[in-house]
């Protein structure tokens, strides 16, 4: 009969899994069955067993095939598995002294698993006819073998009971996870419905309020305006703030749905960096030291100007809010391989490592003692979505000296995509 061999990848996969499975305690030449065989008369031993040598990866017998021979491993190691050898379900690993396929000498049923040699294996095989003849010559041997089979059946039954218990626990865990998943999906739908309500049902009334306030400012008598100027300014500022929040929600939702159009092209970052920083210098009332540092030969990137300008504005606004009076903010841009890396570095309170991914989610904020939380976490969510659409990455890390934060993102250099 020609040898049947696993492919090298299949064999490597099975060998790699061996460390997760303990070797049978029958190993090391100490099994009762091996000791009993060794006590037989040499002539009877030679007549009862057929020797077989197997190469690494050779299939000794296969699941579902008919067979009437059991095997004793004289040397080497084997793996027992079920299913496709590309994705096998490993049952056990056996070494010298173990017996395999013993049920084949008792019943005429298909094999229940596949056995494959892991290295050079030397086997002693005994078929049903020789087994029955040996039992007639050695009556006590039948009792020993039956005891061994009984032990094997007991182990199998215990393993089956353990498996059933594990399966029940697994089903319970799966049901619990399914319930949790459904709860999360329900909460997500509720959040999305709330967002849609804010975006669509509040936007028009807010626009109307904003227009009405501007009309009042334009048409109210001068003396009435003077008396109510402060109230009107507060109302206008509050209305504009709400409109910005609604617009931010709308922008993030559109980008998540892939509805935002990106006008991609060659973009020189240097003038944009200067312009965005210049706007913040105008509103700088905290005497923060602000500077822009970039390489003179900074290459052009492939990007949407309006989206990148907004990303820079959001990140600088975030840094400005949390940088203390007379602190510092640096806008830095350098070339790194086939990308340009931009970092906004501040010396504010910093971001704990456990929160550094979460802060880019919608509505996420970092709870810190002695720090006033502002905003609703929409600016960073927009930045993440926009940069990822540019095939770039965005992250936050400690700034120099581990004081403050460094928000960084990358953009592909023109011609590298």
Image: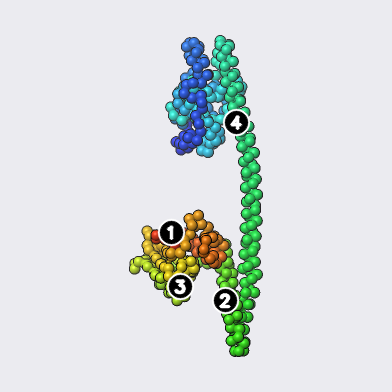
Q: Is residue 277 toward the left or the right of residue 158 in the image?
A: left
Q: Position of residue 253 (x, y in %)?
A: 58, 64
Crowding at label 2, few (<14), some or many (≥20) Cα neighbours within 10 Å?
A: few
The residue carrying mark 1 is 398
Query: Which residue occupies 50% across, 54% down?
Result: 354
**Chain-order first, disc 2 or disc 3:** 2
- Residue 142 image point, x, y percent: 58, 15
Q: Earlier in the sequence, mark 4 or mark 3?
A: 4
Image coordinates for residue 257, horizontal then vertical, percent: 57, 62
Q: Which numbered disc, 2 or 1, marks the residue that appears first in the sequence? A: 2
Q: Are marks 2 and 1 in contact (CB under 8 Å)?
A: no
Find residue 413 and report its image quarter. Answer: bottom left
In the image, 340: left or right of 33? left
Report how far apart the C-alphas of labels 4 and 2 lie in the structure: 71 Å
For mark 4, give the secondary structure. Answer: helix
Q: Quadrant of residue 288?
A: bottom left
Res. 237 mark = 2
Mark earlier in primary sequence (3, 1): 3
Q: Which mark is residue 159?
A: 4
Q: Position of residue 172 (x, y in %)?
A: 65, 42
Query: Mark 4 against mark 3, which lies toward the viewer?
Result: 3
Residue at position x 49%, y 10% in the image: 41
Q: Is there a contact, CB below 8 Å, between mark 2 and mark 3?
A: no
Residue pointed to by mark 3: 286
Q: Nearer the viewer, residue 323 or 392?
A: 323
Q: Is residue 296 above or below residue 153?
A: below
């Amino acid at each position: 009969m020609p040898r049947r061999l696993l492919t090298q990848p299949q064999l490597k996969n099975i060998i790699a899994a061996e460390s997760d499975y303990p070797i049978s305690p029958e190993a090391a030449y100490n099994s009762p069955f091996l000791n009993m065989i060794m006590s037989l008369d040499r002539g009877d031993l030679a007549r009862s067993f057929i020797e077989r040598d197997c190469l690494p990866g050779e299939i000794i017998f296969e699941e579902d095939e008919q067979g009437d021979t059991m095997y004793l491993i004289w040397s080497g190691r084997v793996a027992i598995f079920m299913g496709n050898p590309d994705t096998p379900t490993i049952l056990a690993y056996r070494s010298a002294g173990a017996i395999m396929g013993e049920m084949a000498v008792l019943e005429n049923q298909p094999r229940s698993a596949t056995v494959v040699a892991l290295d050079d294996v030397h086997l002693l095989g005994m078929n049903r006819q020789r087994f029955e003849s040996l039992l007639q010559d050695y009556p006590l041997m039948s009792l020993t073998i039956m005891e061994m089979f009984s032990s094997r059946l007991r182990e199998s039954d215990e393993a089956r009971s353990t498996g059933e218990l594990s399966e029940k626990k697994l089903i319970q865990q799966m049901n619990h996870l399914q319930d949790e998943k459904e709860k999360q999906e329900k909460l997500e739908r509720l959040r999305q419905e709330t967002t849609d309500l804010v975006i669509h049902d509040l936007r028009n009334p807010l626009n109307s309020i904003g227009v009405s306030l501007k009309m009042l400012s334009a048409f109210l008598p001068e003396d009435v305006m003077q008396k109510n100027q402060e109230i009107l300014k507060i109302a206008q500022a509050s209305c504009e703030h709400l409109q910005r929040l609604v617009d931010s929600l709308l922008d993030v939702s559109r980008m998540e749905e892939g509805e935002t159009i990106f006008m991609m092209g060659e973009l020189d970052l240097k003038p944009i960096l200067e312009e965005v920083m210049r706007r913040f210098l105008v509103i700088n009332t905290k005497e923060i030291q602000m500077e822009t540092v970039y390489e003179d030969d900074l290459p052009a990137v492939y990007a949407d100007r309006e989206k990148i300008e907004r990303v820079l504005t959001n990140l600088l606004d975030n840094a400005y809010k949390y940088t203390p009076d007379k602190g510092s903010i640096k806008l830095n841009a350098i070339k790194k391989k086939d990308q340009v890396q931009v970092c906004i570095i501040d010396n504010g309170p910093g971001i704990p490592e456990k929160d550094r991914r979460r802060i880019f989610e919608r509505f996420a904020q970092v709870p810190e003692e002695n720090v006033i939380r502002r905003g609703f976490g929409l600016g960073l969510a927009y930045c993440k979505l926009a940069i990822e659409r540019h095939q770039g990455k965005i992250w936050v890390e400690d700034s120099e000296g581990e004081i403050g934060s460094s928000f960084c993102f990358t953009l592909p250099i023109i011609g590298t995509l």
